[in-house]
Amino acid sequence: MFDTRDCPLSRRSLFAGALTCAGLVLATVPWGVMAQASPEGMATRSTSDQGVTIKVTPKSFGSPDSRWEFMVVLDTHSADLSDDLTRSATLATDEGRTFKPSSWQGAPAGGHHREGVLTFDVPAPRPGVIELRIVRPGESAPRIFRWLL
């Protein structure tokens, strides 16, 4: 057992030391890392149009120069989901950069329910806002899913 009466440091000194350490840790954590862990930053976005619902959930907003992954779910009761997401999706940043997906790992084209992971290689610098845009056959405007990083 530790006897605090023999300790030369007061409780106030220990508390001040702990606060200083916590401040140093917060000062050294990149703000982008803190933002990527926020519930808002990782929230699912959803749109429904012409009987097709698309839900997108970020799996990973990694650091720049890494892969970013999005779980994509397409659902319908009436249409055939023949979308080629590696061709119809783009990731756009608030600085005007756009990226095509590097891969799709999931259900193949067809059917009434598809889900998988859409992956992008994103170079530095880290954007402040991103938009995943999916152009669907027969729809006049792309589906847009937006996140503040």
Image: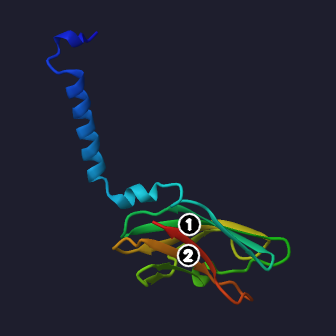
Q: Residue furthest front?
A: 12
Q: Are there few (<14), some (14-19), or many (20+) residues within 10 Å of tag 2?
A: some
Q: In which quarter of the image is the C terminus?
A: bottom left
First of labels 2, 1 by sequence position: 1
Task: Tell me where residue 47 appears, x and y as whole percent.
Answer: 69, 72
- In front here: 9 or 1? 9
Query: For the residues carrying marks 2 and 1, which lies nearer the camera in this image?
Result: 2
Q: In this view, does 33 lie to the left or right of 138?
A: left
Q: Which residue lies furthest to the right in this view?
A: 78
Question: Which label number is shown at residue 56?
Answer: none
Residue shown at 67%/68% (left/top)? 46
Question: Which label number is shown at residue 70?
Answer: 1
**Residue 90 sits in which quadrant?**
bottom right
SS for tag 1?
A: strand
| Kind of residue indicated by mark 1 | Phe
Task: Tell me where residue 65 appears, x and y as whole percent.
Answer: 36, 70
Task: Tell me where residue 23 appears, x and y as whole percent.
Answer: 27, 44
